């Protein structure tokens, strides 16, 4: 009995793996809740993309409502959402759009901003994924909605579309008190 | 018309695969020789029709037939001819076609070089390969047809991804796939053996050369990929623990374990069920790699272009192949396990430890790759698996493997004495200690990984001296270089192949250790006429001029590198804008050398004629790939071992 169980073990492990993969396939990547939601943003200090001698940190996220947008110039979906970020940066004065340039080359990132406009107040430059790991970033684009206390209200995975702000993000923030809220 | 011909060829190949998967297999059970004999012809037929399909797609590329969707999305009339060929496998559909064709090629190779195998074994092996072929051909025809037409026909193609317009990457996928698909032969032999209920030394001897060939290709494919990432992505890094990279690394690890385990099964008849399991794993991991890369489950959780139907198909296919083979294993392996006995201190034990370490590391890489998914599924909280985690795991397991690498070749089969080993190995230990101390002297104490340089250098020297001792031990009763050459020319190829592959590991360790800790990367702002000093080299920036390529415009920088007033290199890094893509590409300029690379990549113009420039000094970086090449060369040499030549000869006699 014992020996035959030993030979069944690989099959058992594989069934577990297959179940996981089926689950992964079913997963709507937009619906995955981030474990960071409701928690303060992870601490970080990074040089800015625009000027390597300047740094930004999590302190720069306090006092204002921010959209922390994780992006890279190589990411096609980021390019797709870029126009929406430009629109939001013009129309949504209460919210600052903060960039986390992720696993990218500075020259590529800056070039993209020069070519297609810069919606960001500032960009943290994270080529080695040092901060991305803390934030649980697995791919770009991802966007975190952060309130003035530095609490993450919501995490948007995948590109921002024309209605994303109104339908997905805005319900999670009270723009008067500038703090997170549960959508009704 | 020609694309339809290609499509039709694929359908015919599928039909042949269906027959190949059933008729010879049934024939092997009811002992009908004519049924079993079909296998060889069918395997050749599959190759023929796959090649016709490849040819049709190639024709569409070369004639810029943009009415074929795949051509329209991956080519352009301005694309250089050579890249029109490599664009064949530049994206999903075409790479599947390449996969299916290579599978058919391996099948035809088995059909040709199996004259000395019993017919039922050949029939079963080819049937199993036919089953795998069905899966891939169906996948292509149902979800990813490379011959799909588009109407109205676009006037111009979207061009091949500029990243892929590079000789390194043109060759990388075929090499990698040859390795992936090659493991299907080892897999098919394992399944055939399980079906036949006969797992013996003969089985190991048959599947061993096939496994080695697949392993060589996979090794070369990974080396090429790493080299490409180094010079094309412009980061100067050579390995990123990216899920796609891990997808190729896991089958390699399992394949490496398999190559060693097969040696034990062939020589000593031990580890039988374990070897079979590794053969199943190596190919399963190849399939899993394909799934992970193609389904969008991991790499591109956010790439919305991926088609869920594709992911579902591969996953179902994966379940049938892997689940089915593991079920077969659970059913049949208990009957065929057992084998030669060995003592605690013996070469078997050392190789078992090697297998366990390689399997453990494979499992860790698999876990790290899937961790984000596992964490999401379980709701466990934040994902922190990344580059540093993999590196830590690598450093935690691989040094033990490197240590064993020195012990293994000197250890005797069945039983050995510790005292004998210590007596033999002390010079290696001494040399390793000296190297470690030497490495320690040059290590800055404040460095975070201060122990890694002594460790890496020590292990490399340990492996080197241990293998010299192994040669000495082997030739103890003979003398002089003549004996070495005679031994090499005679029966010792598989021994010397092993030595060279293992020395490749030592070379690799030196490269990794030195470039990780002494490599320098600097981002600077330079005006034309500026000079920057780096590790004794002066980088003179002479300026930037415009340059037109076949399908891009480039700003081309000119650098002169001098050392002590002598000109060392002229470097021309480029910043390219391809006509069809908004994304600029950086072509780094590298002056390569055996002991160091000088690497310049052009950043952005930062005003007043100044440029942001990236300067790298990479000591010993070539050793990383040199090590990989030596491993592949070692594998190649073992293939020329006498026992395979004798087999081939006797096979020749039998057929004539």
Image: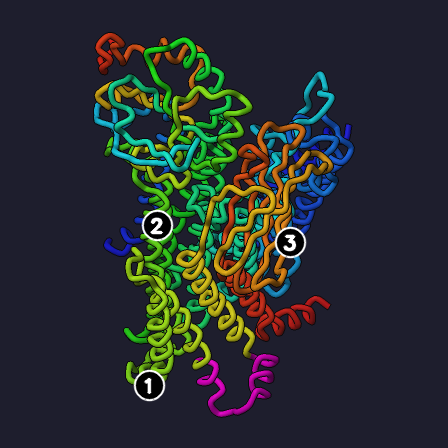
* Residue under pointer 2: B363
Count the marks: how many? 3
Image side of residue A56 versus residue A87, left or right: left
Residue B16 shows in this picture: no
Mark 1 secondary-structure assignment: helix
Whole-angstrom CA distance, mark 1 to mark 2, is 36 Å
Please state the horizontal and vertical placement of residue B632, each as a whole percent of the image.
Answer: 55, 62
Closest to the camera, between mark 3 and mark 1, is 3
Relative to B237, is B76 above or below?
above
Q: Secondary structure at mark 3?
A: strand
Labels 1, 2: front one: 1
**If the image is split into quadrants, where does the N terminus of chain B sit?**
top right
Q: Are marks 1 and 2 in contact (CB under 8 Å)?
A: no
Query: Which residue appears at 38% of the width and 52% of the height?
Result: B362
Q: Disc number at residue B570?
A: 3
Q: How many other residues sit within 10 Å of disc 3, few (<14), some (14-19) or many (≥20)?
A: some
Residue B291: x and y, percent?
47, 38
Closest to the observer, A76 or B231: B231
Q: Nearer the viewer, residue B197 or B254?
A: B254
Q: Are marks 1 and 2 on the same chain?
A: yes
Span of residues in magenta: B470-491
Q: Is residue A39 left or right of residue B120?
A: left
User: Which label's residue is closer to the chain start, 1 or 2?
Assistant: 2
Mark 1, chain letter? B
């Amino acid at each position: 009995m014992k020996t035959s169980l030993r030979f069944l073990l690989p099959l058992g492990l594989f069934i577990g793996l297959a179940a996981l993969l089926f689950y992964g396939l079913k997963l709507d990547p937009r619906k995955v809740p981030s474990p960071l939601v409701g928690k303060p943003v992870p601490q970080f200090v990074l040089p800015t993309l625009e000027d390597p001698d300047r740094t930004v940190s999590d302190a720069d996220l306090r006092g204002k409502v921010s959209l922390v947008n994780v992006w890279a110039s190589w990411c096609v979906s980021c390019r797709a959402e870029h126009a929406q970020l430009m629109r939001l940066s013009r129309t949504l004065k209460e919210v600052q759009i903060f960039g986390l340039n992720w696993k990218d080359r500075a020259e590529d990132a800056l070039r993209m901003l020069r070519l297609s406009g810069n919606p960001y107040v500032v960009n943290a430059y994270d080529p080695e994924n040092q901060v991305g790991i803390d934030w649980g970033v697995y791919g770009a684009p991802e966007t975190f909605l952060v309130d003035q206390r530095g609490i993450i209200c919501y995490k948007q995975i995948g590109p921002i579309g024309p209605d994303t702000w109104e339908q997905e993000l805005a319900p999670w923030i009270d723009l008067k008190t500038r703090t997170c809220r549960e959508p009704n | 018309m020609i694309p339809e011909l290609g499509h039709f060829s694929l359908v015919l190949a599928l039909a042949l695969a269906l027959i190949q998967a059933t008729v010879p297999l049934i024939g092997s059970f009811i002992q009908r020789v004519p049924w079993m004999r079909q296998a060889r012809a069918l395997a050749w037929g599959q190759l023929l029709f796959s090649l016709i399909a490849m040819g049709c797609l190639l024709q569409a590329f070369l004639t810029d037939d943009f009415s074929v969707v795949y051509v329209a999305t991956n080519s352009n009339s301005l694309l250089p001819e050579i890249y029109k060929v490599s664009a064949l496998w530049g994206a999903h559909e075409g790479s599947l076609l390449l996969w299916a064709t290579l599978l058919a090629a391996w099948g035809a190779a088995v059909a040709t070089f199996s004259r000395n195998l019993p017919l039922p074994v050949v029939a079963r092996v080819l049937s199993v390969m036919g089953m795998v072929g069905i899966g891939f051909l169906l996948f292509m025809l149902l979800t990813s047809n490379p011959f799909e037409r588009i109407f109205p026909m676009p006037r111009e193609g979207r061009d091949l991804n500029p990243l892929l317009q590079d000789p390194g990457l043109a060759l990388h996928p075929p090499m990698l796939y040859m390795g992936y698909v090659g493991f299907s032969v080892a897999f098919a032999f394992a399944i055939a053996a399980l079906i036949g209920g006969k797992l013996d030394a003969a089985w190991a001897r048959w599947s061993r050369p096939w496994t080695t060939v697949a392993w060589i290709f996979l090794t070369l494919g990974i080396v090429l990929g790493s080299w490409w990432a180094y010079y094309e992505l412009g980061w100067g890094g050579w390995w990123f623990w990216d899920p796609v990279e891990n997808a190729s690394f896991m089958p390699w690890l399992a394949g490496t374990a398999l190559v060693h385990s097969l040696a034990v099964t062939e020589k000593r008849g031990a580890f039988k069920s374990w070897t079979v399991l590794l053969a199943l794993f190596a190919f399963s991991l190849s399939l899993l790699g394909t799934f992970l890369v193609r389904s969008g489950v991991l790499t591109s959780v956010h790439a919305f272009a991926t088609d869920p139907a594709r992911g579902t198909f591969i996953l179902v296919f994966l379940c049938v192949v892997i689940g089915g083979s593991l079920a077969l294993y659970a059913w049949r392996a208990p009957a065929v396990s057992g084998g030669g006995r060995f003592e605690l201190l013996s070469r078997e034990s050392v190789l078992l430890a090697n297998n366990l370490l390689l399997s453990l590391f494979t499992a860790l890489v698999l876990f790290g790759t899937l961790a984000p998914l596992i964490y999401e599924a379980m709701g466990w909280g934040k994902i922190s698996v990344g580059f540093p985690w993999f590196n830590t795991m690598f450093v935690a397991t691989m040094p033990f493997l490197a240590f064993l690498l020195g012990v293994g070749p000197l250890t005797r089969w069945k039983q050995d004495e510790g005292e004998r080993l210590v007596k033999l190995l002390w010079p290696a230990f001494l040399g390793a200690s000296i190297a470690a101390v030497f490495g320690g002297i040059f290590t800055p104490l404040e460095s975070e990984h201060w122990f890694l340089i002594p460790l890496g250098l020590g292990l490399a020297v340990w492996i080197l001296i241990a293998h010299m001792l192994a040669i000495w031990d082997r030739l103890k009763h003979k003398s002089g270089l003549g004996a070495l050459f005679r031994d090499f020319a005679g029966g010792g190829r598989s021994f010397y192949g092993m030595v060279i592959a293992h020395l490749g590991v030592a070379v690799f360790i030196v490269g990794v250790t030195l470039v990780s800790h002494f490599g320098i990367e600097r981002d600077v702002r330079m005006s034309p006429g500026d000079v920057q000093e780096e590790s004794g080299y002066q980088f003179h920036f002479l300026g930037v001029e415009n340059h037109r390529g076949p399908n891009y415009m480039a700003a081309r920088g000119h650098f002169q590198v001098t050392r002590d007033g002598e000109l060392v290199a002229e470097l021309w890094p480029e910043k390219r804008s391809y006509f069809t893509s908004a994304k600029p590409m950086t072509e780094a300029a590298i002056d390569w050398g055996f002991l160091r690379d000088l690497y310049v990549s052009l950043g952005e113009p930062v005003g007043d004629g100044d440029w942001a420039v990236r300067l790298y000094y990479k000591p010993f970086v070539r050793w990383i790939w040199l090590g990989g090449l030596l491993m592949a060369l070692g594998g190649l040499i073992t293939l020329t071992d006498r026992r395979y030549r004798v087999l081939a000869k006797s096979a020749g006699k039998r057929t004539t």
